[in-house]
Amino acid sequence: MSRLRRMPRQQPAASRPVRRRSYDQFCASARALDSVGDRWTLLIVRELLAGPRRYTDLHADLPGVSTDVLASRLKDMEQGGLAVRRKLPPPAAASVYELTERGHGLLPVLAALAEWGAPALTERRPTDAVRAHWFALPLLRALTGLTREGVLEVRLGEGEFHVRTGRGAAVGSEGEPYGFGPAPRPDARITLDAELCLELGRGDVTLAEVVKDGRIEVAGDGPLAAELRGE
């Protein structure tokens, strides 16, 4: 009679580690990273700083993000008090995401990151996506000296966007610091190329210098256009 061979007991499959949601450190920087340290979160904030956006618009302007990751990050931002979702009134049948006051408080964080990262933009790689409004944050730094409040339309070869100047560009002010596309009623308009926009953001040149040299074309008849021209 043959002896039955005992089969080894199958070990249970190793469970996947639970995603860590906190650094568990009593430190302000660690707490901030608990909220915005995940990949894509700050770039979603960058998009929402320009105003409320639909999910499909966010996905279109965040090349490379998967639908699952984007949905997860937006949910985390809602739970963390950085963003809210609301339904547009009729006849629009869509929901949009927008930043809360706490979410808008990340503007100086994004501006500082843009200033720190600007030297790395020495050349555009073949795989690099680009959107015109991504140049708004570097440009805002160069416009901080403007005293006239208004809406400035910016025209690049990559497209158009608009920014607020003066106190209107400050955190907590009414309206968004920048927006997509041309402004409905701009107080002034400038035309320049993306490279010059980056030079301004890095502080390599000043706004007054490039306007005087004719590298920026200024259009408009109001006080903001006059200040841009140095009049």
Image (cartoon, rainbow, N blue to C red):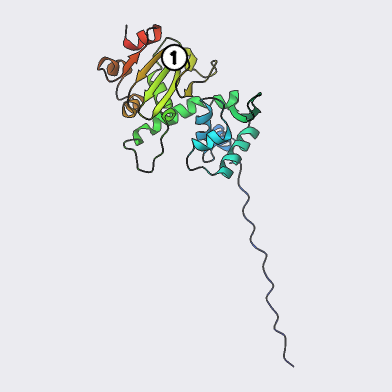
* Quarter residue 150 falls in: top left
Relative image position of residue 73 (x, y in whole percent): 58, 39
Relative image position of residue 109 (x, y in whole percent): 49, 28
Query: In the image shown, does 212 or 108 lie closer to the viewer?
Result: 212
Residue ID for mark 1 = 186
- Locate the C terminus by quadrant: top left
Q: Secondary structure at mark 1?
A: loop
> Which residue is situated farthest in the front direction here?
91
> Which residue is situated farthest in the right direction here?
1
Relative image position of residue 178 (x, y in whole percent): 47, 22
Q: Residue at x 43, y 11 (%)?
A: 187
Query: In the image shown, does 41 or 214 lie closer to the viewer?
Result: 214
Query: In the image shown, does 12 or 26 lie closer to the viewer?
Result: 12
Q: Residue at x 43, y 30 (%)?
A: 134
Kindly identify the amino acid type of the residue bearing the numbered disc 1: Pro
* Quarter residue 55 falls in: top right
Q: Is residue 170 left or right of residue 125?
A: right
* Quarter residue 66 falls in: top right
- Locate the N terminus by quadrant: bottom right
Q: Residue at x 65, y 28 (%)?
A: 86
Query: How crowded is the residue under tag 1: few (<14 C-alpha within 10 Å), some, or many (20+)?
Result: some
- Residue 82 visible? The answer is no
